[in-house]
Amino acid sequence: VTGSQGQLGSSLMTSAPGSLNVFGRSRDDCDITDHRAVNAVFKELDPNVVINAAAYTAVDRAELEPAKAFAANAIGARNVADAARQAGARMIHISTDYVFDGSQTVPYTPASKARPLNTYGKSKLEGEQTVLATDETALVIRTGWLYSGGQNNFLQKILNRLLVNSPLKVVDDQVGVPTLTSDLALAIWSCVDLPGQRGIHHWVNNGTASWYEFAQRIREVALNAGILRSAAAVVPISSSSYPAGALRPSYSVLDSTSLWKVLGTPRHWHNALDDLLEDIASRAISREGKDHRGPSATKDSRNDTILS
Ligand SMILES: NC(=O)c1ccc[n+]([C@@H]2O[C@H](COP(=O)([O-])OP(=O)(O)OC[C@H]3O[C@@H](n4cnc5c(N)ncnc54)[C@H](OP(=O)(O)O)[C@@H]3O)[C@@H](O)[C@H]2O)c1
């Protein structure tokens, strides 16, 4: 698993099936932009399968440093695909809903025309194309709006901001599917056992939401679960109200039918979020009395222009 300390990489590592020998490699252990480093890891481990969860994911910052985004998301993906082909390993590569421009009003299928609006999306699209051109047996799984119980994501950022007693403005005119990394990780592990799955597929949780609806539900459930004792209001705004580093699609719901048919329909994002927040609450309650200071401040540049 490359990018093993990222959101998805961490979930893959903690949910790896006991029947598999799984090795995680972080950027420090294996920088995928360095083909020698990638080849050395393949030589050391001789894997049957490689899951490429490493990526440059700072959507806004990518507009300022496109070379870095393309280095990781296109050249890095090609380095992993090259090494996988030479080693006879199967590659599972993770991509994004931001390859789409948002002009559709119905879910995007894997066959829908990709037309990214921003540098991050362009770099990820080039990554998909180079992976499939290098290894036609590769499986590319596009997903969207990832979050987890870890430190660096939209959920934590919303919880932190709700503690500040001023209204939290969140964009209401971008619609996608909040997807829990641990649910996606289990779907990816199931794909390891399905070598016939190749080409581009989509996988997200069930349901749809705007960022505002996602934030609003976080607020409601966090209050009900006792994670927050009080919370600022969440106010819907349009994305045109705030200057964004990168354009984002107004609609990026992924039609995941092709994998859902094989793996089963996943739970609704409401249920995934509710369960995660319940879990966070029960862990906080067990710490209560010792050191319950609420969520800690985090730095996350992925969603800087979604909320203000
Ligand atoms: N986050 C989302 O909402 C979202 C939505 C759709 C698709 N995706 C896709 O899902 C996958 C996983 O995303 P994520 O949310 O887990 O991202 P993440 O938390 O940013 O994790 C990515 C990991 O890749 C590492 N990395 C970056 N450049 C690297 C390099 N050159 N070599 C090796 N490792 C490198 C990062 O390390 P550093 O922290 O040191 O940079 C980080 O640990 C990515 O392919 C992403 O494009 C994400």
Image (cartoon, grey):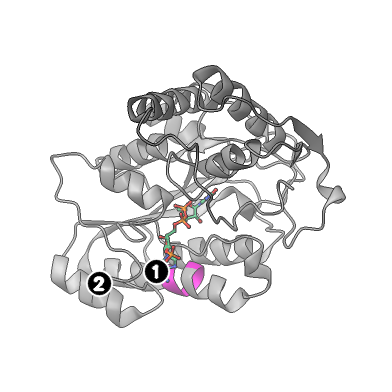
Q: Report which residue position mark 2 lands on.
A: 86
Q: Residue 299: x and y, percent?
A: 55, 56
Q: Which label number is shown at residue 111? A: none
Inspect the image, locate mark 1, and give the three-letter code of the amino acid beneath it: Thr
Inspect the image, locate mark 2, and give the three-letter code of the amino acid beneath it: Gln
- Left or right of 203 in this view: 29: left
- Label 1: which secondary element: helix
* Residue lying at the far front of the rendered structure: 289
Q: Report which residue position mark 1 lands on.
A: 134
- Left or right of 295 in this view: 15: left
Q: Residue at x 47, y 35 (%)?
A: 258
Vertical relation: 259 (above or below) 22:
above
Q: Residue 263: x and y, percent?
A: 37, 30
- Left or right of 53 in this view: 214: right
| Structural distance between the alpha carbons of marks 1 and 2 | 10 Å
Vertical relation: 257 (above or below) 94:
above
Q: Answer whether residue 151 is magenta in the image.
A: no
Q: Residue at x 68, y 38 (%)?
A: 211
Q: Residue 4: x and y, percent?
A: 33, 57
- Label 2: which secondary element: helix
Q: Which residues are magenta?
A: 73-77
Q: Nearer the viewer, residue 298 or 61?
A: 298
Instruction: Determine whether the beta carbon of the residue marked 1 sits less than 8 angstroms from the nearest atom of ligand 1.
Output: no
Res. 118 image quadrant:
bottom right
Q: Answer whether residue 75 is magenta in the image.
A: yes
Q: Residue 136: x and y, percent?
A: 38, 60
Res. 23 image quadrant:
bottom left
Q: Nearer the viewer, residue 262 or 35?
A: 35
- Left or right of 149 in this view: 196: left
Q: Using the rendered image of the protein, determine whether residue 194 is visible from the camera's viewpoint.
A: no
Q: Residues within 10 Å of mark 2 (few under 14, many from 20)?
A: few
